Amino acid sequence: MTRASEAPLRGAAPSAVARALRPFGYLLVGLVWTAIAAVVVALGPGVLALVAVDGTMELAGVWERFAAQPSELVALVLAVPLLVVLWGPGVLWYLPSATWPLAALSFVYVARSLSPAFAHERLSFTEQAARGATIGLPTAAGVALSLQPVRQSRVTAWLMRFYVSGWVPDGRMFVAMLPAGLGWLLALVGLARDVPPAWRAAALVVAALLVVWSARLGRRAWVRRFSDAPAPASPREAGVAGMTADQRRRRLEELRRARSARVRGAGGDGRA
């Protein structure tokens, strides 16, 4: 039986033409997001793989140029924290999480569009997020968050967690990915052929340790964000813009206060 909360999202049954065309539409959208995700991966691990395979990168000339110009050296020192932020949280987490889940969801909808069980309902919906609640450039009316599933499953729920992680930034995950950004820069140093072998090995080892540290911190941030969140009552609440971080925090506080009140009430009844 369809829940009443899902009815507005499923809407009217799609026409025969829409049912015939939507597999191709979702496939095209999925391929586009796959291409975008591939570009994002190329900016992060892809750069390191290219440098490692090429084996010709040298840092001596770059360092001499910066050392000869004090102003450029200062700019380099100031640019390092910026690169750590851009490549750690940005390129290594937020951008991948904002792209590949959309590709995966599109392919899920391709499969669903070919299934008779989904023939008479919408497969996805779009909602408007509040301004400033998502990544990206500021817009006048907020960001349209599309390809959210009308009917949830374990697969789509798992994909939507990455979707949320990418489009609705979380402070804990931002901090967790900073060591990975520094590790990415150290990996570049370790792959430069003119760096002494001992220094190269040390840089690569430290880079690997920083990535492991980020993974541990990221897992904690993931668990705290998604394990503590209350279960949504409807697909609309399950959407990215359904509940902000402050709303989730207030909801958790309400649940904890209610539980404490029940515990105190049970204790009072026992004493009576």
Image (cartoon, helix red, strand yellow):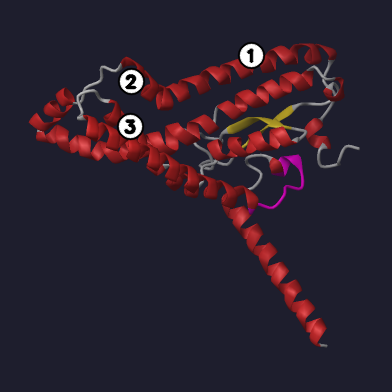
Q: Quadrant of residue 257?
A: bottom right
Examine the structure image and report whether residue 235 is included in the region drawn in magenta: yes
Q: Position of residue 91 (x, y in %)?
A: 43, 31
Q: Are marks 1 and 2 in contact (CB under 8 Å)?
A: no
Q: Quadrant of residue 162?
A: top right
For label 3, the SS is: helix
In screen coordinates, is 97 left or right of 252? left
Q: Earlier in the sequence, mark 1 or mark 2?
A: 1
Q: Are marks 3 and 1 in contact (CB under 8 Å)?
A: no
Q: Which residues are magenta?
A: 228-237
Q: Nearer the viewer, residue 33 or 208?
A: 208
Q: Is residue 231 above or below residue 30?
A: below
What distance separates the C-alpha of mark 3 from that of mark 1? 36 Å
In screen coordinates, is 59 left or right of 138? left
Q: Nearer the viewer, residue 31 or 11?
A: 31
Task: Name the chief secondary structure element in magenta.
Answer: loop
In screen coordinates, is 189 left or right of 248? left
Q: Position of residue 84 (x, y in %)?
A: 34, 38
